[in-house]
Amino acid sequence: MKKGWPRKQLGELAELKGRIGWRGLTAKEYTKSGPLFLSVHSLNYGDYVDFRDAFHISEERYTESPEIMLQKDDVLICKDGAGIGKVGIVGELPDRTTINSSLLLIRSGKEILPKFLYHCLSSPYFQEIVNSRLNGATTPHLYQRDITEFPVVLPLFPEQQRIVIILDQAFDGIATAKANAEKNRQNARALFESHLQSVFTQRGEGWVDTTIGEHIRFIDYRGKTPEKTESGLRLITAKNVKMGYLQKTPMEFVAPDSYDSWMTRGIPRIGDVLFTTEAPLANVAQLDTVEKVVFAQRIIIMQPDSTKLDATFLKYLLLSQPIQQRIHTKGTGATVKGIKASLLKLIEISFPKSVADQKQIVAKLDDLREETQRIESLYQRKLAALDALKQSPLHQAFSGAL
């Protein structure tokens, strides 16, 4: 801290207000219009509070808590749950707005600029206090008194303005770099998806037309999934099956002695294609382990006739946009879209008659996928580095080195 900068507690510089409980408010009371009702999701999109995920509540529910009716330049901080410590500042309000009980409203007084306060709460110094409350906590919670007593270094207004301008310029540059990195990451993925689509829309000679059910054995498991345990055999659910790969998390288990009684409809093999029938519909991956695993409902295991259809080719085929579109068109369900095995078997597909030709296509797709994943990973690391870079000017600003 620079010599001569005073230090005051946040409670001396700002008004802190939070929703006192839910007062019986439940999600059933959310309305289609009316005053906006913010949660931590609104702090996920940069410096300024975003209103795209806001719910609506009735006029009566809005007016019962006048102390937390938002104003321009209010600062919000999440004090509960997974988003604890997230901070946002309110810009232009699209409508009358209030907050839920996980957020705390901080309204600047006459001695501190709202944007300076926002940067102060985003700084490593305040986030250290947040992290100290997380250690060993089952339910993370940041108490209002901790925030109220937070020591704030308080230069004069001209110095606050200078620091805000420097930080805003630095963060604008970082935001631009992040936008470019994210665009390049998405372009890499789009390149693969475009090539994948071209393979299955601009087919060559020697392709045959058939249906999914023609040369593929289906295995699914019905009834009540075995009870989960803390250890044992890995349970693979629809949550693990992503678009093109099998995700390890969530890592769930069932007792080993449930294997024989549950897996009576068929035993999966490494390389088998996994297909989710709903929630989500039509995610596709391949089994990547020879170890015994148990599958929950909502997954169909596909075992193609290897003399007709290569399993990895089938994976790419099912991932392609034309086939995904056909599957989703056949899907049914008012709230959760799904597809029955009987309908899935009728989906029309095409593939080269020669399995050797299929393997050649797979080799090219594998190479392109590996390269695009390498590029995606590169830009993902760059995005993480840019996020970390924001801490440097914040550290300098509130240590007096800026």
Image (cartoon, helix red, strand yellow):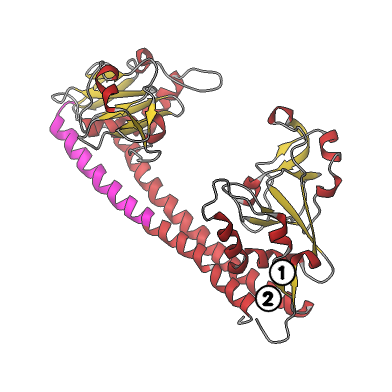
Q: Is residue 253 above or below residue 112?
A: above
Residue 373 lies in the magenta-colored region: yes
Residue 247 in percent (x, y) is at 36, 40
Which quarter of the figure has residue 208?
A: top left
What amino acid is found at the position of numbered circle 2 in the picture? Ile
Give how far across and how far down residue 101 sits, in percent: 71, 44
- Is 356 on the left-hand or right-hand side of 135? left
Q: Return the x and y of residue 243 as percentages of the image width and height.
A: 37, 37
**From the viewer's perspective, is 358 left or right of 49?**
left
Identify residue type, mark 1. Answer: Phe
Which residue is at a point 35% across and 56% down the rendered structure image? 375
Does 394 appear above or below 284? below
Query: Compared with residue 316, is residue 8 higher up or lower down, i.e. above or below?
Result: below
Q: Quadrant of residue 57?
A: top right
**Which quadrant holds the C terminus?**
bottom right
* The image quarter in which residue 4 lies: bottom right
Residue 163: mark:
2
Q: Percent from the top left, x then y, of residue 123?
A: 61, 67
Say whether marks 1 and 2 touch (CB < 8 Å).
yes
Residue carrying label 1:
116
Residue 202 visible in the displayed image: no
The residue positioned 58% from the left and 49% from the top of the image is 140
Is residue 209 rendered magenta in the image? no
The part of the chain drawn in magenta is 353-377
Q: Is residue 353 visible?
A: yes
Secondary structure of the residue carrying tag 1 is helix
Q: Nearer the viewer, residue 213 or 225?
A: 225
